[in-house]
Image (tube, rainbow, N blue to C red):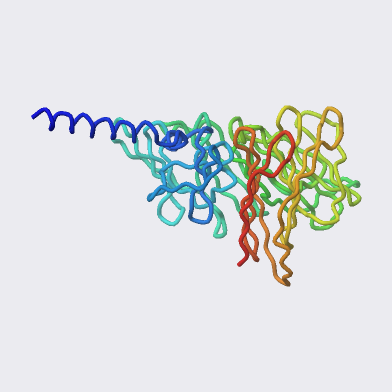
Amino acid sequence: MLFNSMKRIQVIFILFWLISTQPSFSQSWDRCDNTNSFYLYQGMGFDLGSMSWATYDDLPYYTFKTCSGFKHLFINYTEQKKITYEGTVFEIKDGDEMLVVSDGDSGVTSSVCIRQSEYSDVYLMETSNGIVLVSNCWSEYFTAEKYDRRRKSQARTNRNDFAAQKLDQYGSRYEGTRKLRYNTGQEFIFETDTLQYSDIGGCLVFTLSDFSVKTYPFKPCGYAMKQDGNGYEGLFYKKDNMSYFQKIGSNEAYQLDSTEYFDQQMGIIVDNKLIVTTYSPISTGSKLWCYDLDKKTMLWKAEVDQLNVPHSKYFNHVYLSLYKTRIILEGDEAGGDYLQIFDLETGKKLFSDIKKR
């Protein structure tokens, strides 16, 4: 009897020890916020906290790519047709022609017709103060309407707000184009151009929270995010074969680097330091460096491992994000993939996994 009691105590102690000694990083995987350290890569999991491969049999429901402020980099918003907001379900149905809203409290269901053209992208986006129904038809028009949980309309744009028309130097109106270039999860960044005058163009930023619009006199080649990834802090653009960066609310442009080897830039601002990655969508490779906006000097350049794959038909996309003091650089190229981690302060490479196809 005493022997059996001792065995039970021993088993309980072993089970308690096994539970208490589980890696602490697993505790962050059941939360959907910026502390989630599970980074999904190549169908596997990498823990950004312990800097090691995760060995869970089943992938956790929450990951860094679905929960952090940088999730907009990994989400295809045009496929987002259903969102639950404060207990109310918003869903696009009937071939993108109907928005159906189901109130979770009362059980009442209502619907509204969606105005669109044959080639529209129709989808839903969630903001801090409502659900936005988006209908975007490339250069023709862009409309957005925000609803609260009771399906009451809070704000709406119309086609004329985003009409691609301007006045030339003689006062004549001419047609133009407007293309959605970037979706930050909080803003839409459009590139505007003209059909008659290729040298006339600019940028238009539409903010989802208040439906405000800002315009810039240049075409963007990228944007810099806030430290937590939620929203943009400024825009990159090219002029005379040089790269420039302009912060929100400032007319000062920072000259950064030559644009000879890249077309796109992505950045993160941390304590007024600009972390930047540069790459070309049609050729291999990427760069990573840090620029001090206060001192206007380069702080460091990271040694990024490259695939260096020659190819006549190529695609290349780079994802830049931040977990605490670790910069995450993921590359998806026609010739392979890579995941590399760097120290925020020094640019030192902490981890690199590179695979050629």
Q: Position of residue 207 (x, y in %)?
A: 64, 35
Taking depth in this image into account, of 51 and 68 the one nearest to the observer is 51
Residue 6 as seen in the image, left or right of residue 225? left
Residue 355 as seen in the image, left or right of residue 298? left
- Occupied quadrant, residue 268: top right
Residue 303 as seen in the image, left or right of residue 37? right
Instruction: Please say whether residue 197 is visible from this viewpoint.
Output: no
Q: Is residue 196 above or below residue 35?
A: below
Residue projecting furthest to the front? 3
Residue projecting furthest to the bottom? 312
Kindly identify the residue that appears in the image at 83 percent across and 57 percent down.
196
Residue 237 as seen in the image, left or right of residue 139? right
Q: How many marks?
A: 0
Q: Position of residue 98 (x, y in %)?
A: 43, 49
Q: Position of residue 161 (x, y in %)?
A: 67, 41
Taking depth in this image into account, of 282 and 116 the one nearest to the observer is 282
Kindly identify the residue that appears in the image at 84 percent across and 37 percent down.
298
Quadrant placement of the N terminus: top left
Instruction: Please say whether residue 189 is visible from this viewpoint.
Output: yes
- Occupied quadrant, residue 68: top right
Taking depth in this image into account, of 15 and 334 the one nearest to the observer is 15
Q: Is residue 118 above or below residue 69?
A: below
Residue projecting furthest to the left? 1
Taking depth in this image into account, of 307 and 193 the one nearest to the observer is 307
- Occupied quadrant, residue 323: top right
Quadrant placement of the C terminus: bottom right
Q: Position of residue 32 (x, y in %)?
A: 46, 35
